Amino acid sequence: MNRKNKPGCLHLVGVGPGDPDLITYRAVQVLETVPVIIAPKGSAGGASSALATARAQVDMTNKEIVELHFPMKKVYAAQGREQDTEILDAWNNAARTVLSFIDKGLDVAFPTIGDPAIYSTAYYLHATICSLRDDVQVNVIPGISAMSACSAASRQPLGLGEEIITVIPAAFNRENIREILETSETTVLMKVHRSLDLLLGLLDETGLLDNATLIERCGLPGQNIYKDPRDAAGKQLHYFSTMIVCKNRQANGDS
């Protein structure tokens, strides 16, 4: 590290569900201030959705921008489960890239879709950096989550009174999903684009098809709200697809 420079700070910035109008004022302030933005992207040849969202609100002129590929593979949170080596390589590469700027005294923003605390690459990066160095200053800016935006778009509450809300990735084990659907008043299923057939079967078996709403590309061009998720069967859903199942309320979203 160049000791003449005060180390920079890493900002993990939630930029909301994808609609640029849903970026918080605080997120815009941070993104406008930092000289370096390191943005995640899901495919090596693609572009960063988080960066595209941020660009709509923030002038990126004169900023150094680095887009890094994070493979879209299953990540295990439980200790003892081995992560895919490609994922580990991506996290370590990103951590080293962040540290290279921080050690020059430059603040870095890492924008992430939704909220950094909810199934986000941001905290994997944070954990990797902390495993390499324990002296890095990290600031977290919360963002409007996808489930909040989907709740608003479909005009249905996620929870009322004593209701229990459970949020799970749709790649969960089939029996785990069934148990949660049967015991939770509201179940929010994230990233359902590859699991729709499984979910439709479970919803039919548990009698909850009329209580499920599927929201695709919430707040973006091409937004779809399926009051009957069966209408989406056989379609190639976008990665930004969320299902809300409210046991005490039938679906009432608009198409």
Image (tube, grey):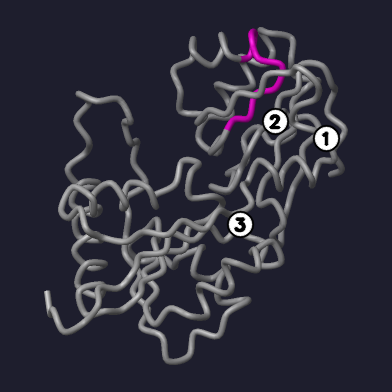
Disc 2 and disc 1: Cα gap in Å?
9 Å
140 versus 8 height, above or below: above
88 versus 3 height, above or below: above
Q: Earlier in the sequence, mark 3 or mark 1?
A: 3
Helix, strand, or loop for circle 3? Answer: loop
Q: Position of residue 96 (x, y in %)?
A: 18, 63
Disc 2 and disc 3: Cα gap in Å?
18 Å
Q: How many marks?
A: 3
Mark 3 packing: few (<14 Cα in 10 Å), some, or many (20+)?
A: many
Helix, strand, or loop for circle 1? Answer: loop
* The C terminus, quarter of image: top right
Q: Nearer the viewer, mark 2 or mark 3?
A: 3
Q: Which residue is mark 2?
A: 244
**185 within the magenta span:** yes
Q: Which residue is mark 3?
A: 16
Name the amino acid, label 1.
Answer: Gln
134 versus 167 height, above or below: below
Q: Nearer the viewer, residue 200 or 68?
A: 68
Position of residue 138 in the picture relative to residue 148 (left or right): left
Q: Are marks 2 and 3 in contact (CB under 8 Å)?
A: no
User: Quarter-wise, where is residue 231 in the image?
Assistant: top right
Q: Residue at x 61, y 47 (%)?
A: 145
Q: Earlier in the sequence, mark 2 or mark 3?
A: 3
Q: Are marks 2 and 1 in contact (CB under 8 Å)?
A: yes
Question: Which of the numbered marks, if any, corresponds to residue 156?
Answer: 1
Extent of the magenta region: 181-189
Q: Are marks 3 and 1 in contact (CB under 8 Å)?
A: no
Name the amino acid, label 2.
Answer: Ile
Mark 2 packing: few (<14 Cα in 10 Å), some, or many (20+)?
A: many
Mark 1 packing: few (<14 Cα in 10 Å), some, or many (20+)?
A: some
